[in-house]
Image (cartoon, rainbow, N blue to C red):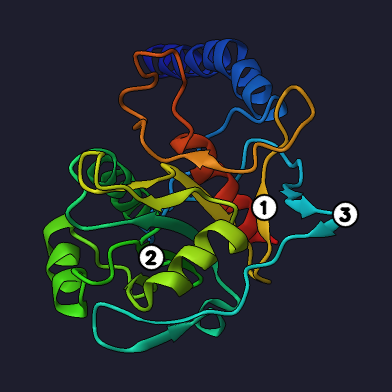
């Protein structure tokens, strides 16, 4: 009986020591919200955000800038309009398939974002080619396969060149130009625009108190910073996509 009593005492002592050492740590982690949840039933990215600050609207002459109406043909030969993106959070870019410089970097970053939001039916991408004479639906489809574009809401679109340039410059205030003297024959912005479910251009407020407006699409998360000292903004973009998905 004595041995049995000693065993109970030993077990009780172990439980007491565990409580003294570990329970305060667990309580402290919960209090400071330092607990990680694992969603075993879903492989999707969590939409939990690090802060609750609302994203700003891009305002032109005091009015929130909304994506204008558009209608183009995608890589499947289907007509896609702005209405196909209603109720969705999406990224806008201007590119061309034969671009030898920034486009491959931009689209690799977009694919990385795409793969982070697998399963979100209300997330998409709108890619407009600035070389529609070459970038036919067939060419765009091959490009999509090459880069691993699988999101059904990612449309690579082609159409009338003047209409596309008008959309870029007037619709999004993103620089686009044809220039035979530059490598690839075209110039365009390397930035991404972020659009909310209602079609408005949105962005975060920087530390200086001004809206970021657009997100640098060239520097990857892995690079962190380019040779000129500019930091990557893909992680910011992913965080802000989550915010708009939660709105």
Give the distance between the C-alpha atoms of the residues marked 3 and 2, in whole angstroms: 27 Å
What is the secondary structure assignment of the residue under circle 2? strand
* Image disc number at residue 202: 1
* Comes first in the chain, label 1 or label 3: 3
Q: Is residue 100 above or below residue 19?
A: below
What is the secondary structure assignment of the residue under circle 3? loop
Q: Quadrant of residue 246?
A: bottom right
* Image disc number at residue 128: 2
Q: Quadrant of the C terminus?
A: bottom right
Q: Quadrant of residue 77?
A: bottom left
Which residue in the structure is indicated by mark 3?
62
Q: Nearer the viewer, mark 1 or mark 2?
A: 2
Q: Which residue, as the protein is rendered here, is positioned at the far bottom?
A: 78
Residue 103 visible in the shown view: yes
Marks 1/3 in contact by CB < 8 Å: the verdict is no
* Residue nearest the observer in this picture, 237 or 99: 99
Report x, y in % for residue 118: 35, 61
Give the distance between the C-alpha atoms of the residues marked 1 and 2, in whole angstroms: 19 Å
Q: Residue at x 28, y 46 (%)?
A: 103
Residue 47 visible in the shown view: no
* Comes first in the chain, label 3 or label 2: 3
Give the distance between the C-alpha atoms of the residues marked 1 and 3, in whole angstroms: 14 Å
Q: Quadrant of the N terminus?
A: top left
* Residue nearest the observer in this picture, 31 or 163: 163
Q: Quadrant of residue 76?
A: bottom left
Horizontal placement of 104 versus 130: left or right?
Answer: left
Report x, y in % for residue 21: 56, 10
């Amino acid at each position: 009986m004595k041995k049995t009593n000693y065993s109970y005492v030993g077990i009780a002592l172990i439980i007491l020591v565990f409580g003294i050492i570990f329970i305060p740590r667990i309580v402290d982690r919960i209090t400071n919200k330092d607990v990680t949840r694992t969603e075993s039933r879903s492989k999707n990215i969590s939409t939990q955000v690090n802060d609750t600050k609302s994203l700003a609207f891009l305002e032109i002459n005091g009015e929130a800038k909304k994506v204008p109406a558009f209608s183009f043909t995608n890589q499947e030969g289907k007509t896609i309009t702005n209405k196909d993106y209603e109720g969705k959070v999406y990224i806008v870019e201007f590119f061309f398939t034969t671009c030898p410089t920034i486009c491959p970097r931009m689209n690799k970053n977009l694919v990385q974002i795409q793969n982070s939001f697998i399963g979100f039916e209300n997330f998409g991408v709108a890619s407009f080619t600035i070389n529609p004479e070459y970038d036919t639906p067939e060419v765009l489809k091959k490009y999509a396969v090459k880069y691993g574009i699988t999101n059904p809401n990612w449309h690579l679109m082609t159409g009338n060149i003047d209409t596309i340039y008008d959309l870029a410059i007037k619709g999004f205030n993103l620089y686009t130009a044809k220039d035979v003297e530059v490598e690839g024959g075209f110039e365009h912005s390397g930035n991404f625009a972020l659009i909310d479910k209602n079609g408005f251009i949105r962005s975060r407020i920087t530390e200086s108190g001004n809206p970021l407006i657009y997100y640098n699409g060239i520097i990857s998360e892995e690079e962190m910073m380019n040779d000129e000292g500019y930091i990557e903004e893909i992680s910011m973009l992913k965080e802000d996509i989550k915010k708009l998905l939660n709105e």
